[in-house]
Image (spheres, helix red, strand yellow):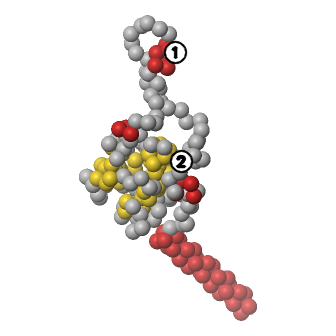
Amino acid sequence: MSELTLLLLRFGFLIILWAFVFAVVYALRTDLFGQRVRRLPADVASGAVAASPPFVASAVAPPVAPAPAWGGGTASDATEAFEVQPNRGNSSLVATRLVITSGPKEGLELSLPKEPLTIGRSSESGLVIRDDYTSTHHARLMLWSEDWVIQDLDSTNGTFLNGTRVTLPTPVPLNTPVRIGTTSFELRR
């Protein structure tokens, strides 16, 4: 091979090597400091409540209990009579504490604040979870019109509500497990 070919191969190898080094540094920086957290609109952050939340799908319907076994009416009448309504107006059904059920902080109980609670590895988070599978700013738990809602903040490993990955802000029923990394918690009264 000529000297010019060897020189070009050396420069090509150095360029590839430096590209790899920059990719590793970028990945480490993202892992250590996380990505930018999206801010809530001003009315949500201040606690003002709109007619319907802009981030919750409008097609979400409350769960329906099964019809009773006794007769006396049509099945649709029985289903309408036993439809489970959201917590509106009944503050005794609103969760007031968060209980960690598994993970390094198992047994820890926190009183839920009225403002949004950020969960993640960052020391700025309201609930700090030191875990290799938890992002710096992993999820946000917020009170929306007397319902607690969990929002995944584009975490790497995801947030799971009762075993299902959360992609949109989703209401969290009482005593339903939420898993972030290796830590699970429930909302309780």
The disc placed on residue 116 is none
* Dot 1 amino acid type: Ser
| Alpha-carbon span between mark 1 and mark 2 | 33 Å
Quarter of the rendering occupied by the C terminus: top left
In the rendered image, the quadrant that contains the N terminus is: bottom right
First in residue order: circle 1 vs circle 2: 2
Indicate which disc residue 49 carries: 2
Percent of width and height locating residue 37: 54, 63
The residue lying at 71 percent from left, 86 percent from top is 8
Q: Is residue 157 left or right of residue 38?
A: left
Disc 1 secondary structure class: helix
Which mark is nearer the camera, 1 or 2? 2
Going by the picture, which residue comes out furthest to the bottom?
3
- In the depicted view, which residue is nearer to us: 168 or 40? 40
The residue lying toward the viewer, choosing from 156 and 171, is 171
Where is residue 64 drawn, in percent x and y?
47, 26
Nearer to the camera, 55 or 4: 55
Q: Is residue 181 visible?
A: yes
Q: Amino acid at mark 2?
A: Val
Q: Residue at x 55, y 66 (%)?
A: 36
Disc 2 secondary structure class: loop
Q: Residues within 10 Å of mark 1 (few under 14, many from 20)?
A: few
Is 148 on the left or on the right of 102, as rendered? Answer: right
Front residue of this view, candidates 62 and 49: 49
Residue placed furthest toward the left: 107
Q: Report which residue position mark 1 lands on.
A: 76
Q: How crowded is the residue under tag 2: few (<14 C-alpha within 10 Å), some, or many (20+)?
A: few
- Spot occupied by residue 79 in the image (x, y as percentages of width and height): 48, 19
Q: Residue at x 59, y 35 (%)?
A: 59
Residue shown at the point (56%, 54%) measured from the top left: 43
